[in-house]
Image: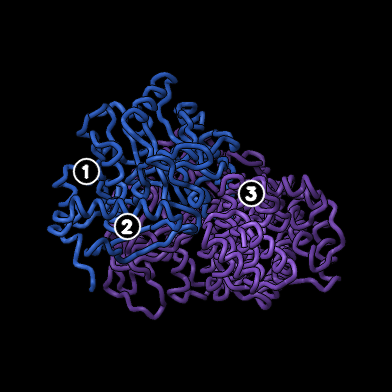
Amino acid sequence: MSDILYVTGADRRFFATTLMLLESFAQQLPGERLMVCDYGLAPGQQAYLAERGQLLPRPADLPESLHPYAKKAAILEYVEALPWRGLCWIDADMLVTGLDAGVMARLFQRLDDTGAAIALTTDINGIALRDVAAMDEGGVALAPFRTLLADSGADPDAPYVSVGFWLCRSKSLLADWDRRSRGLTPHPLFEQNVMALLVHGPRWGHAGGALLLDPVEWQPQNHLLPLIHADGGGHAVRGRTVRLVHCTASRHWFMDVYDGHVQVGKGALAGYFRILRNPCLRAFQTRLLGDHVAHHGDALTRHGLLTAADP
Amino acid sequence: MSLAQALSAAVAHHGAGRLDEAEALYTAILAQVPNQVDALHLRGVLTLQRAGGDASRLEAGVGLIRRAHAQPGAATVPDIAANLARGLAALADNRQRAGQPDRALEALLEADALGLPLEAAARLALADGLASAGAVVEAESHYRRLLAVDPASVPARASLARLLARRGKAGAALELLDTLPPADTATAAAHRLRAELLITDAPQRAAAVLAAIEAAGLADADTHHAWGRLSQAAGDIAGARARYARALALTPRHAAARLDHAAACLRLGAWRDGFSDLAWRWMRPGTTRRHGAIPLWERADQDIAGRRLLVWDEVEAEALPHLARLLPRLRDRGVDVVVEVPPGWAPLLPTGPGQPLAGIDVAIRGRDTVHADFQVPLQEIPERLALWDPAGFWTGPYLHAPTPTPALPASPPPGRTVAVAGDTAQPILPRGVVAMPLRPPPPDAPEGWAHVAAALKAADAVALPVGILAHLAGALGRPGVVLVPPDADWRWPATGEATPWYPSLRLIHGTDWPQAPVMA
């Protein structure tokens, strides 16, 4: 085990999606463990993860009804009892395909070398803070973000960032992320907005502390999903090795969404799935689900998570 | 017959339009040599020729040319790349017409990734698709590539201008639309966009553009909507309402017109129409009507007496101080109400015994767990309770400065004081009256709202622009004046000195404060 603690988070709906991440992570980083923050898992899901030593229960003082984005920003509370030098977050709807211990060690070394507090990617669409502020097209949905943008003093032309994947070594940054996100009026991607302003806003105390990564390499998503192709044992897109695939896109384009169950072998897994249309990624997801059921089907069945498929 | 002879014969048939014969020969060649590049290519072209609007045939034709393009040496064969580009563009067009914009974009992205020579219409479709997917930077680069080849292209200019406007770059967008050919069916959308962009800074030019569109008989719902916004910016709210109504008559599901119509109605006191149309705000980008997994209280005839109802405040900071007045109405109908408020606001809600909001539970967002049977956004309550009588809106004061009063950050000045906004132009006050500048607290110090409320209570009067400070002053029942600009939101009446929302406040209409004392 390295000094890096790996975490994700899921509620009962996203649990099934998380299984693909867990399987891909286990295959790519066999010496590490990916912990799952409980954002509202069902008892069987909790028991399954606890049995595997991968459950991070909701802290007692964290409101059960707190918005999932705010729970994500409250990550320090979840990992309070665990030792780490670097904390690595991976969204539950990601697939690990080009990460290994060496890649992560080198990334951590880059943090040390540059003095950065956090490594995270810019936005896949190349947008700036001003684009987010204008995203509601004259409406009020992003009004809270506009207020925060002005308060932070961040340059509106600074690149927007994603919190789908990050590696952080600063508890102080994460504490401020939680403090500033916790009571916010929910608005689109509000915890991501807060992080973007933390790493760019001179009045918020952490400006310049981010090592900005290339999203095409680290978490291709959206319009790049159809372009990802198999490359050796992994995947590539636009000439770059893909580290993680982020199964998310504007309007849920480029994927089929199943909010019921999917059949895996002779069993059925209930939950929410985003199955990508790109044939090589669809095959990857299918293989991951099959592998996970093959390896852990008994436990999934025992906890009521895998049932017999309809004949 | 050798392979070369067969191919030559197939091409001859193909060229002469004998497609059955050509297809048979291409098929025979591929049966013998499955990856024969010319047979793959030309059989694919033939399949596309015969596809018409049949999606599966288009897929098949593209599939064959794609295989040809992937063969070693394909680059030396004329036209494979161009035909693959045409095939993918035809496939994209077919998918777009079938209501599959993402599948259409997939085809165009493939063509672009392969470096195929895209025709202008295909590149425009690619740019439009990327813009729809939010990939605005890549979309912009494709629009600019089109304009580099044909600077006069109206579709490319209009689409790029729309994208730039969406990104908050109205000036750059307008530059692209400066020289347009006269309005006709092909250019009307670009003219309309130009008018919309001119409304704020050049209303007369905007009016001229809209008039030209109307004169050409090209006025549609968007045109009337733009006219409405122009009237609204000029302070003619009744005129704006009429234009929005015309837009809705043409396109009833025009969300922006519906929402602007709501605001105009509410500013004119037409509560029923206004609150009804206000529900269209959920059609705006980035809005979500549901707050967690609790079921919505969706209909006025749904009996929720005795049930636990979560009321929440949406994203506008003004919503809570403006409409917290409605919470007792729910309580009085036997509803068990819990209201979720942002940090810092709980002390301002008078929920103690005998106080206006007695019996209302308050949950602080981010701190308290909320369990409820139903939920409703605060601004939907008037519609649920059918509150259409303006006289019934005031039951205040319904907020209070917490007691004991927190120490003010600075001692109030001696003498008569008037609370003013510290971050905007200040009104002229009567001689001897001292201005007490107030600012909303910073986002990470929300406890400052108690100080603001205490300061408003301590001041003798207020003179504030529209905004959250004015709402808080009104909810506290403080006397004073409020400056209402022509483009104020729906919570401020368009005309008259009085507002049914806040009887203690007098309205002054205008963009700037008068050049004379605003109160006696």
Give whichever of B251, B8 is nearer the camera: B8
Q: In this view, does B13 lie to the left or right of A86?
A: right
> How many C-alpha atoms fall within 10 Å of the one at disc 2: few (<14), some, or many (≥20)?
some
For the point 44% across and 69% down, which residue is it? Answer: B381
Q: Mark 1 points at which residue?
A: A56
Q: In this view, does A10 lie above or below A301?
A: above
Mark 2 — on which chain does it sit? B
Give the colour of chain A. Answer: blue
Quarter of the figure that contains the N terminus of chain B: bottom right
Q: Is residue B201 above or below residue A73?
A: below
Q: In this view, does B397 lie to the left or right of B257?
A: left
Q: Is residue A202 visible?
A: yes
Q: What is the CA distance from the residue labelled 1 to the residue labelled 3?
A: 41 Å
Under mark 2, the amino acid is Thr
Under mark 3, the amino acid is Ala
Give whichever of B205, A277 is nearer the camera: A277
Q: Would you say the residues marked 1 and 2 are in contact, meaning their CB atoms lie under 8 Å apart? A: no
What element does badge 3 sit on? helix
Name the residue furthest top: A113
Give whichever of B24, A67 is nearer the camera: B24
Name the residue furthest front: B1
Of callouts 3 and 2, the N-terminal one = 3
Q: Mark 2 points at which residue?
A: B351
Q: In this view, does A42 lie to the left or right of B247?
A: left
Q: Residue B240: image x %, image y %?
A: 71, 68
Q: Mark 3 points at which residue?
A: B139
Q: The purple chain is which one?
A: B
> How many C-alpha atoms fall within 10 Å of the one at disc 3: few (<14), some, or many (≥20)?
many
What element does badge 2 sit on? loop
